[in-house]
Amino acid sequence: MIYVLSDIHGNAKNFDAILQQICLQPEDTLYILGDVIDRHPDGIRILRKIMSMPNAKMLLGNHEYMMLEALKAPKNEISDSPWERNWPSKKIRLWYSNGGKVTHDYLKHIRKSIRAEIVAYLEALPVNIDIEVNGIKYKLVHGTLLENYGTGYRSYRYASPVEFAVWERLPVDSPVPEGYTLIFGHTPTIHYHSDNPLTVWHGNRLIGIDCGSGFPINENAYLEKGRLACLRLDDMKEFYSDSIAQESLR
Protein backbone atom coordinates (compact mmCIF):
# COMPACT_ATOMS: atom_id res chain seq x y z
CA MET A 1 0.00 0.00 0.00
CA ILE A 2 1.11 3.56 -0.74
CA TYR A 3 0.26 6.32 1.74
CA VAL A 4 0.79 10.08 1.54
CA LEU A 5 0.59 12.69 4.30
CA SER A 6 1.97 16.17 4.88
CA ASP A 7 2.47 18.97 7.40
CA ILE A 8 2.65 17.11 10.72
CA HIS A 9 4.16 20.23 12.33
CA GLY A 10 5.45 18.62 15.49
CA ASN A 11 2.13 17.13 16.53
CA ALA A 12 3.09 13.65 17.75
CA LYS A 13 -0.44 12.85 18.89
CA ASN A 14 -1.77 13.33 15.37
CA PHE A 15 1.08 11.40 13.74
CA ASP A 16 0.71 8.48 16.14
CA ALA A 17 -3.05 8.40 15.52
CA ILE A 18 -2.47 8.06 11.77
CA LEU A 19 0.17 5.35 12.22
CA GLN A 20 -2.22 3.43 14.46
CA GLN A 21 -4.90 3.50 11.77
CA ILE A 22 -2.85 2.63 8.71
CA CYS A 23 -0.80 -0.14 10.38
CA LEU A 24 2.21 0.13 8.06
CA GLN A 25 3.54 -3.19 6.82
CA PRO A 26 7.12 -3.78 5.59
CA GLU A 27 5.94 -3.80 1.97
CA ASP A 28 4.08 -0.47 2.36
CA THR A 29 5.51 2.98 1.65
CA LEU A 30 4.65 6.20 3.46
CA TYR A 31 5.45 9.46 1.68
CA ILE A 32 5.67 12.54 3.90
CA LEU A 33 5.52 15.78 1.93
CA GLY A 34 7.52 17.97 4.32
CA ASP A 35 6.88 20.25 7.29
CA VAL A 36 7.40 17.61 9.95
CA ILE A 37 8.76 20.25 12.34
CA ASP A 38 7.77 23.55 14.03
CA ARG A 39 4.70 24.97 15.78
CA HIS A 40 4.11 21.95 18.04
CA PRO A 41 6.95 20.65 20.28
CA ASP A 42 7.64 17.14 18.98
CA GLY A 43 9.01 17.89 15.51
CA ILE A 44 12.55 16.63 16.05
CA ARG A 45 11.37 13.48 17.82
CA ILE A 46 8.99 12.76 14.93
CA LEU A 47 11.73 13.50 12.41
CA ARG A 48 14.11 11.07 14.09
CA LYS A 49 11.37 8.44 14.06
CA ILE A 50 10.84 8.97 10.33
CA MET A 51 14.60 8.72 9.77
CA SER A 52 14.51 5.27 11.40
CA MET A 53 11.57 4.01 9.32
CA PRO A 54 12.86 2.08 6.27
CA ASN A 55 9.55 2.46 4.41
CA ALA A 56 9.13 6.22 4.99
CA LYS A 57 10.22 8.68 2.30
CA MET A 58 10.21 12.39 3.01
CA LEU A 59 10.24 15.58 0.94
CA LEU A 60 11.73 18.89 2.00
CA GLY A 61 9.16 21.38 3.27
CA ASN A 62 9.53 25.11 3.75
CA HIS A 63 9.93 24.64 7.51
CA GLU A 64 12.85 22.24 7.11
CA TYR A 65 14.25 24.67 4.54
CA MET A 66 13.96 27.54 7.04
CA MET A 67 15.68 25.45 9.70
CA LEU A 68 18.62 24.61 7.44
CA GLU A 69 18.97 28.25 6.36
CA ALA A 70 18.78 29.50 9.94
CA LEU A 71 21.37 27.05 11.23
CA LYS A 72 23.79 28.10 8.49
CA ALA A 73 23.26 31.83 9.09
CA PRO A 74 25.72 33.91 11.15
CA LYS A 75 24.53 34.75 14.64
CA ASN A 76 24.32 38.42 13.74
CA GLU A 77 24.05 40.26 10.47
CA ILE A 78 25.58 43.61 9.61
CA SER A 79 23.04 46.39 9.92
CA ASP A 80 23.21 50.16 9.54
CA SER A 81 21.05 50.46 12.63
CA PRO A 82 23.08 50.15 15.89
CA TRP A 83 20.12 48.82 17.84
CA GLU A 84 19.68 45.94 15.37
CA ARG A 85 23.26 44.69 15.47
CA ASN A 86 22.69 42.29 18.34
CA TRP A 87 19.52 40.79 16.94
CA PRO A 88 19.45 37.17 15.76
CA SER A 89 19.97 36.73 12.04
CA LYS A 90 17.09 37.54 9.72
CA LYS A 91 16.83 33.86 8.80
CA ILE A 92 16.44 32.84 12.44
CA ARG A 93 13.84 35.56 12.95
CA LEU A 94 11.91 34.29 9.93
CA TRP A 95 12.06 30.75 11.29
CA TYR A 96 10.91 31.84 14.75
CA SER A 97 8.05 33.88 13.30
CA ASN A 98 6.81 30.68 11.65
CA GLY A 99 6.89 28.55 14.80
CA GLY A 100 10.53 27.45 14.68
CA LYS A 101 11.63 28.48 18.18
CA VAL A 102 10.24 25.32 19.77
CA THR A 103 12.27 23.25 17.29
CA HIS A 104 15.44 25.30 17.78
CA ASP A 105 15.17 25.05 21.57
CA TYR A 106 14.97 21.26 21.30
CA LEU A 107 17.94 21.09 18.93
CA LYS A 108 20.09 23.03 21.39
CA HIS A 109 19.74 20.27 23.96
CA ILE A 110 20.67 17.23 21.89
CA ARG A 111 24.13 15.94 21.05
CA LYS A 112 26.00 17.63 18.22
CA SER A 113 26.40 14.28 16.48
CA ILE A 114 22.63 13.81 16.39
CA ARG A 115 22.13 17.36 15.13
CA ALA A 116 24.64 16.65 12.38
CA GLU A 117 22.74 13.49 11.37
CA ILE A 118 19.47 15.42 11.21
CA VAL A 119 20.99 18.22 9.12
CA ALA A 120 22.60 15.73 6.72
CA TYR A 121 19.29 13.89 6.33
CA LEU A 122 17.38 17.10 5.58
CA GLU A 123 20.00 18.40 3.16
CA ALA A 124 19.62 15.22 1.09
CA LEU A 125 15.82 15.40 0.80
CA PRO A 126 14.22 15.88 -2.63
CA VAL A 127 11.57 18.53 -3.29
CA ASN A 128 9.54 16.52 -5.84
CA ILE A 129 8.98 12.77 -6.28
CA ASP A 130 7.24 10.98 -9.17
CA ILE A 131 5.45 7.72 -8.42
CA GLU A 132 2.92 5.44 -10.12
CA VAL A 133 0.14 3.54 -8.34
CA ASN A 134 -2.34 1.30 -10.16
CA GLY A 135 -1.32 2.83 -13.48
CA ILE A 136 -1.90 6.40 -12.28
CA LYS A 137 1.09 8.75 -12.29
CA TYR A 138 1.52 11.18 -9.41
CA LYS A 139 3.85 14.07 -8.74
CA LEU A 140 4.36 14.59 -5.02
CA VAL A 141 5.42 18.06 -3.89
CA HIS A 142 5.36 20.18 -0.76
CA GLY A 143 4.44 23.58 -2.20
CA THR A 144 4.69 23.49 -5.98
CA LEU A 145 6.61 21.90 -8.84
CA LEU A 146 10.31 22.65 -9.05
CA GLU A 147 9.98 22.79 -12.83
CA ASN A 148 7.62 25.77 -12.54
CA TYR A 149 10.47 27.99 -11.35
CA GLY A 150 11.02 30.86 -13.74
CA THR A 151 7.75 30.33 -15.59
CA GLY A 152 5.56 32.66 -13.53
CA TYR A 153 5.59 36.22 -12.31
CA ARG A 154 6.13 35.16 -8.70
CA SER A 155 9.47 33.41 -9.28
CA TYR A 156 11.38 36.65 -8.73
CA ARG A 157 10.46 36.53 -5.04
CA TYR A 158 12.67 33.50 -4.41
CA ALA A 159 16.43 33.13 -4.14
CA SER A 160 16.56 29.66 -5.70
CA PRO A 161 14.42 27.00 -7.40
CA VAL A 162 14.36 24.98 -4.16
CA GLU A 163 13.10 27.95 -2.14
CA PHE A 164 10.41 28.47 -4.78
CA ALA A 165 9.34 24.81 -4.71
CA VAL A 166 8.89 24.67 -0.94
CA TRP A 167 7.35 28.13 -0.40
CA GLU A 168 5.14 28.89 -3.41
CA ARG A 169 1.44 28.02 -3.19
CA LEU A 170 -0.65 26.34 -5.86
CA PRO A 171 -3.72 28.19 -7.14
CA VAL A 172 -6.92 26.22 -7.49
CA ASP A 173 -6.58 26.22 -11.28
CA SER A 174 -2.86 25.44 -11.40
CA PRO A 175 -1.82 23.57 -14.58
CA VAL A 176 -0.51 20.05 -14.07
CA PRO A 177 1.88 18.22 -16.42
CA GLU A 178 0.01 16.03 -18.88
CA GLY A 179 -0.63 12.53 -17.60
CA TYR A 180 -0.06 13.33 -13.91
CA THR A 181 -2.03 14.10 -10.78
CA LEU A 182 -0.29 16.48 -8.38
CA ILE A 183 -0.47 15.84 -4.63
CA PHE A 184 0.68 18.65 -2.35
CA GLY A 185 0.70 19.97 1.22
CA HIS A 186 1.78 23.41 2.50
CA THR A 187 -1.53 25.22 1.93
CA PRO A 188 -4.37 24.16 4.27
CA THR A 189 -7.29 22.76 2.33
CA ILE A 190 -9.65 25.35 3.83
CA HIS A 191 -8.30 27.66 1.12
CA TYR A 192 -9.63 25.36 -1.59
CA HIS A 193 -13.03 24.33 -0.22
CA SER A 194 -14.20 26.47 2.68
CA ASP A 195 -17.54 24.66 2.69
CA ASN A 196 -15.80 21.41 3.67
CA PRO A 197 -12.71 22.47 5.62
CA LEU A 198 -10.08 20.19 7.10
CA THR A 199 -10.67 17.41 4.62
CA VAL A 200 -8.59 16.29 1.66
CA TRP A 201 -9.33 18.49 -1.35
CA HIS A 202 -9.73 16.94 -4.83
CA GLY A 203 -9.44 19.38 -7.72
CA ASN A 204 -8.69 18.95 -11.42
CA ARG A 205 -5.76 16.51 -11.18
CA LEU A 206 -4.80 18.32 -7.96
CA ILE A 207 -5.06 16.85 -4.46
CA GLY A 208 -4.37 18.95 -1.36
CA ILE A 209 -3.74 17.06 1.88
CA ASP A 210 -2.73 19.69 4.49
CA CYS A 211 -5.68 19.67 6.88
CA GLY A 212 -4.23 22.00 9.49
CA SER A 213 -2.32 19.72 11.89
CA GLY A 214 0.11 22.56 12.57
CA PHE A 215 -2.36 25.03 13.96
CA PRO A 216 -2.93 25.16 17.73
CA ILE A 217 -6.33 25.48 19.32
CA ASN A 218 -7.82 28.97 19.01
CA GLU A 219 -5.11 30.44 16.78
CA ASN A 220 -7.55 30.50 13.89
CA ALA A 221 -11.24 29.93 14.28
CA TYR A 222 -11.52 27.92 11.08
CA LEU A 223 -8.55 25.77 12.05
CA GLU A 224 -9.61 25.24 15.65
CA LYS A 225 -9.96 21.54 14.92
CA GLY A 226 -6.98 21.19 12.61
CA ARG A 227 -5.98 17.60 12.02
CA LEU A 228 -3.57 15.39 10.12
CA ALA A 229 -4.77 13.67 6.96
CA CYS A 230 -3.34 10.63 5.19
CA LEU A 231 -4.38 9.38 1.75
CA ARG A 232 -3.97 5.77 0.62
CA LEU A 233 -3.41 5.90 -3.12
CA ASP A 234 -4.29 2.27 -3.82
CA ASP A 235 -7.99 2.92 -3.16
CA MET A 236 -8.03 6.68 -2.31
CA LYS A 237 -9.18 6.02 1.25
CA GLU A 238 -8.74 9.00 3.56
CA PHE A 239 -7.55 8.71 7.16
CA TYR A 240 -7.76 11.49 9.75
CA SER A 241 -5.97 11.83 13.06
CA ASP A 242 -9.18 12.54 14.98
CA SER A 243 -10.99 9.44 13.68
CA ILE A 244 -9.91 7.31 16.64
CA ALA A 245 -11.24 9.87 19.10
CA GLN A 246 -14.52 10.08 17.20
CA GLU A 247 -14.87 6.29 17.19
CA SER A 248 -14.31 6.15 20.97
CA LEU A 249 -17.24 8.53 21.54
CA ARG A 250 -19.73 6.31 19.74
Image: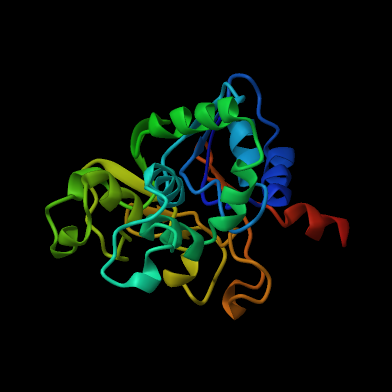
Q: Which sits in the foreground, 86 or 24? A: 86
Q: Which residue is pictured at 39% across the width and 33% down the height?
A: 123
Q: Residue at x 34, y 39 (%)?
A: 127
Tell me which corner region of the image, top left, top right, bottom left or bottom right, holds residue 136: top left
Q: What quarter of the picture does the C terminus occupy?
A: bottom right
* Numbered label tally: 0
Q: Is residue 58 left or right of residue 91?
A: right
Please state which of residues 136 and 50 is positioned toward the viewer in this rendering: 50
In percent of width and height, residue 114 lies at 59, 28
Residue 191 on image: x %, y %: 43, 71
Give the residue furthest to the bottom.
221
**Is 239 on the left-hand or right-hand side of 143?**
right
- Against 199, is 26 above or below? above
Residue for point 27% across, 47% down = 145
Whether residue 71 is visible? yes
Residue ID at (68%, 71%): 217
The image's colour scheme reads rainbow
Instruction: Locate residue 158, reporting x and y percent.
Output: 22, 56
Quadrant in which the N terminus appears: top right
Specify whether 8 is left or right of 132: right
Q: Residue furthest front?
A: 82
Residue 149 relative to residue 227: left or right:
left
Q: Quadrant of the rendered structure where residue 168 is?
A: bottom left
| Residue 102: quadrant of the picture | bottom right
**In the image, residue 112 above or below residue 170:** above
Q: Is residue 8 visible?
A: no
